Amino acid sequence: MSSSSPAIPVQRFLTGITTTGTPHLGNFVGSIRPSVAASRLAGVQSFYFLADYHALIKCDEPSRIQRSTLEIAASWLAAGLDPERVTFYRQSDIPEIPELTWLLTCVTGKGVLNRAHAYKASVDKNTAAGNDPDSDVTAGLFMYPVLMGADILMFKAHKVPVGRDQIQHIEMARDMAHSFNHLYGEHLVPPEAVIEESVATLPGLDGRKMSKSYDNTIPLFAPREQLRKLIAGIVTDSRAPGEPKDVAGSALFQIYQAFASASETAALRQAYADGISWGDAKQVLFERIDQEVAPMREHYLALINEPARIEQILQAGADKARQTATPFMRELRQAVGLRKLGAQTGSAKKEKISKAAAPVFKQYRESDGKFYFKLLDAHGRLLLQSDGFDNPKEAAQTIAGLQTQGAAALAQPENRLHTPAGVTSDEVAAALQQLADAKA
Ligand code: TRP
């Protein structure tokens, strides 16, 4: 299975799709199509899976989860994913994933999870409505990033292709890997997010991002006539036939661009300038999408009518995935001390982790383009969070200030620093002192 060519180092790609709905054109352009393309590259090993444990966080309809799992699996296969080449599996067939989730839970600061966007959004919504901050928030939602970390770290993925909204989760998986390795030795590989810059998020029928939550989607495998009808419903402005039209802000044009070649796109741009009618433009879009989707649609329908065949493919994928996961989990259990009692364990001194646990500053850039840093304690717990700085130098200077002035720098408002609830300035001061001592 492993290509042992020494010339090209293998890069492992991994991504999952949550099984809560019917795949739409946005999923195809943003995730399914690029993941299939990546899986065909030389030197790439791909792990693609159906995130059905994640689905439970958002969906309590069992039949919907089952149906969505079938539809997403069939879509991936119809789009050309080769299960011989890719490790293609269902998350819940890999019991090692929830097992690793627990090990990671024990090295993840609760304060770190408090800052996760999805959880914070729920808290903010509750607070705005005057409710208890955690009203209707399940522990599953809170733990979402840890489960996702286990998905990624289990297969030592280097690259994780995701949408922008998932960058923070990849950052967290990196932090989990560092915390774990710090405590137990180098076992986990810190991953990196891959953002497909050329694929802007696809707009939906109403011009907002195509998303199940806006109810503005076009199902990827809608029958031809339904596809025509849905495309006819895309919002446009009220310009009459013959009037020049704007490509900027035109959902129709953006969707076309995601399917068409550069020269086809240029031709439609010209047609807009020449005053093509909206009806004709929609016809052009419909034919272009149908041309790409029709052959896959046939394959999809055949697959969806043979769930047992898909089940077989997923079982084979799970077997393949577990050939990696089972021994790796054994290694990790050993590393943390979940061990058989018979064999004599290494002596305590040999076991002792080489490096003394130490706090660490981390600098990073968020999707708003600004530069941030945070201070984590030795267990990855968040002690200090900065606001965004316009350039990395300002952030670095603030860190330098903290290192020379200690906790006194916290009191200066221009440093724009926050300590999360439950963290005292004494703890921050102690961590800074520990860093200073280590340097000396
Ligand atoms: N959270 C991802 C989403 O909603 C799905 C997902 C689950 C995932 N586990 C993953 C993506 C691991 C990448 C890697 O889009």
Image (cartoon, grey):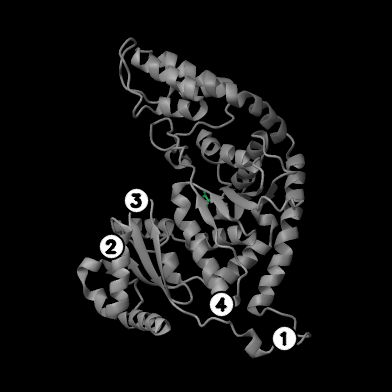
Q: Is residue 23 above or below residue 123?
A: above
Residue with the mark numbered 3: 368
Q: Which mark is residue 345?
A: 1
The answer to whether the residue labelled 2 contacts the one labelled 1, judged by CB atoms less than 8 Å apart, is no
- Residue position for label 4: 183
Does residue 229 appear left or right of residue 13 in this picture?
Answer: left
143 on left or right of 398: right
* For residue 63, side relative to residue 130 (left or right): right
- From the image, which quarter does the C terminus lie in? bottom left
Image quarter of residue 241: top left
Q: Position of residue 388 (x, y in %)?
A: 30, 59
- Image position of 358 with respect to 108: above or below: below
Q: Answer above or below: position of 306 versus 404.
A: above
Nearer mark to the viewer, of 2 and 1: 2
Label 3: how many Cα within 10 Å (few below 14, some 14–19, many 20+): few
| Marks 2 and 1, how far apart at CA | 49 Å
Identified by mark 1, the residue type is Thr
Location of mark 2 (residue): 394
Assign a secondary structure to mark 2: helix
Cα–Cα span, label 3 and label 2: 16 Å
Q: Amino acid at mark 4?
A: Leu
Along the viewing direction, whichever of 114 and 367 lies nearer the viewer: 367
Q: Is residue 277 shown to the viewer in this render? A: yes
Lower position in the chain sequence, tag 3 or tag 2: 3
